[in-house]
Image (cartoon, helix red, strand yellow):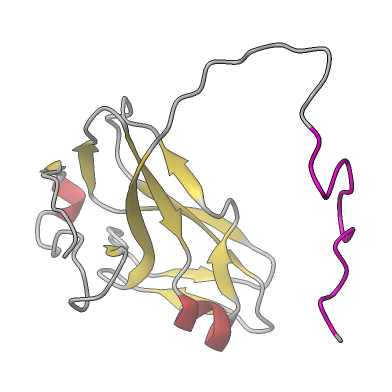
Amino acid sequence: MSSVTDLQVRRLPNGADLALPGYSSAGSAGLDLRAAIQDDIELSPGERRLVPCGFCMALPDGYEAQVRPRSGLALKHGLTLLNSPGTIDSDYRGEIGVVLINHGEAPFTIMRGMRIAQLVVAPVVRVRLAESEFLTDSERGAGGFGSTGLGVK
């Protein structure tokens, strides 16, 4: 069974009549974010836009929120997030917004209340840097992009 953490949210005037973010099913990892816009937005292929979600939140210390694309919008329409996942820090108190981009071949219309992204709240581990002249060895070593191959046998 998963644990539950309270998340304070404040509804803004542009989202007053919209549902707050919520989980679509019992097993959903992300809360659905909705477009808190007054008029439809038509995103042309290649166009990007910041879409407001109509609420602010106060994440508990030690947590972040990750804004992620919705798989159905990505597959069916080529609509995704320009910075995915987008990170919201625990000390941010402004309106939550989603940077959408249309990678599809046709214009896409965003309508008020449409579910446009998802929000995953996750714990954050803070580190303390320890500068060193040498690093411990690993099997991979300094091998970077593509160094482990395609995994096809």
Q: In front: 122, or 102?
A: 122
What secondary structure is the stretch in magenta mostly built from? loop
Q: Position of residue 108 (x, y in %)?
A: 52, 78
- Give the position of the C terminus as an image quadrant: bottom right
Quarter that holds the N terminus:
bottom left
Q: Is residue 108 left or right of residue 110?
A: right
Q: Residue at x 55, y 77 (%)?
A: 74
Horizontal and vertical percent position of residue 116: 39, 68
The residue shown at (21%, 32%) is 60
Q: Nearer the viewer, residue 144 or 108?
A: 144
Report the number of numbered marks.
0
Q: Is residue 145 magenta?
A: yes
Q: Residue at x 85, y 62 (%)?
A: 148
Identify which residue is drawn at 45% across, 25% down.
Answer: 126
Magenta extent: 137-152
23 shown above or below 20: below
Q: Is residue 130 magenta?
A: no
